[in-house]
Image: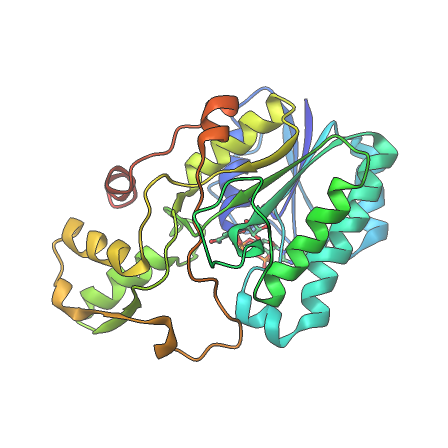
Amino acid sequence: MKILLTGANGMLGSAITEQLSKTNHTLLATGKGELRHNHLIFNEKSNYASLDITDQVRAKHLFDSFKPDAIIHSAAMTQVDDCELNKDQCYSINTASTMSLISLAKEVNAAFHFISTDFVFSGDDGPYVESDQIGPVNYYGETKELAEQYLIQSGLSWSIIRTVLLYGKTDQIKRSNFIYWVRDSLVESKPIKVVNDQIRTPTYIPDLAKGIIKAVEGQAKGIYHISGDEIMTPYQMAIEVARFLKLDEQLITPVDATTFTQPGKRPQRTGFYIKKAIDELGYAPTAFKTALAEIFS
Ligand SMILES: NC(=O)c1ccc[n+]([C@@H]2O[C@H](COP(=O)([O-])OP(=O)(O)OC[C@H]3O[C@@H](n4cnc5c(N)ncnc54)[C@H](OP(=O)(O)O)[C@@H]3O)[C@@H](O)[C@H]2O)c1
């Protein structure tokens, strides 16, 4: 299968690239600017090309020349507060560019697999199943919701894969994520305040990449929730990191989200029930403690 990926320089995109480049699929991994991750190995069946997804001319050129069978659309403006403060840019990247890519996919009759987020939900009553009512509480979530709706009505073969709070080994791509922030703060003996009134089902990045590839290979259609299966607050995650690394958990103080003033509101209770992904995609999440052992080994 010929697969075009967007956002290959990102946390998830680089993991998908790493896994897909070891398969027999023909991959065109694209990202904004140059490829920044030297550990990714390309071969005769996998290549990298720069693609700023707001550049429709460049996107059309790549679609016409590569003629993908499937698109995995992972690129996005992902920082919730940046989205709230720069709404035009957030709309342009997350909604308008996704619409353009969907139109291009139609021209070459490619399946479209869109990576979306738990932040399309209000957070009043999570964890959520795929059929639950959406209703975002911040602009990032709104732009993703609009893109989802456009895709659903596109007439294409589509899937929407929503996920939750990604974590994993991202030092190779010089990116931090929540667990590195906890580790680094504790190693430096810095006290940290961590939210204990939000729930999530944190997602181990390699698991998600695997699940997405299964969805693409199985030509999955419809909405899928892919995340971990353990319901945790960020505070509980931080405590697990401290215990695993034998660092001082007394440095971690549980707080309510109201302690922080952030431009973008966070939904309080999200997280997913993932039975559909397990049953239909053979998705198998790694336990949080096992993932920590892999990350810090
Ligand atoms: N991280 C989470 O906890 C989380 C949770 C739920 C859903 N998701 C979704 O999962 C997907 C992957 O997110 P991630 O965590 O891997 O985020 P990420 O590391 O921020 O990756 C997003 C990628 O999109 C790229 N991008 C931004 N604007 C672009 C543009 N105009 N053209 C081309 N590429 C552009 C970024 O490029 P640069 O690297 O050059 O900036 C980045 O590499 C996103 O769709 C996100 O909404 C993430």
Where residue 5 appears, as percent x and y from the top left, is: 65, 39
- The image quadrant where one finds the N terminus is top right
Q: Is residue 32 left or right of residue 130?
A: right
At horizontal 86% and vertical 51% (from top left) the residue drawn is 57
Query: Quick check: 231 above or below 206?
Result: below
At horizontal 51% and vertical 70% (from top left) the residue drawn is 265
Q: In this view, does 30 lie to the left or right of 129?
A: right
At horizontal 84% and vertical 43% (from top left) the residue drawn is 103
Q: Which of 123 and 208 is in front in this view?
A: 123
Labels in figure, total: 0
Query: Quick check: 213 above or below 263?
Result: above
Q: Is residue 44 left or right of residue 122?
A: right
Residue 246 at least partly seen: yes
Where residue 9 appears, as percent x and y from the top left, is: 56, 50
Where residue 141 appears, as percent x and y from the top left, is: 60, 59
- The image quadrant where one finds the C terminus is top left
Q: Nearer the viewer, residue 170 or 292?
A: 292
At horizontal 39% and vertical 28% (from top left) the residue drawn is 284
Q: Nearer the viewer, residue 80 or 70?
A: 80
Q: Name which quarter of the figure residue 182 lies in.
A: bottom left
Residue 33 at least partly seen: no
Q: Looking at the image, in which quadrant does ligand 1 appear?
A: bottom right
Q: Name which quarter of the figure residue 242 lies in.
A: bottom left
Figure colour scheme: rainbow
Query: Quick check: 108 above or below 136?
Result: above
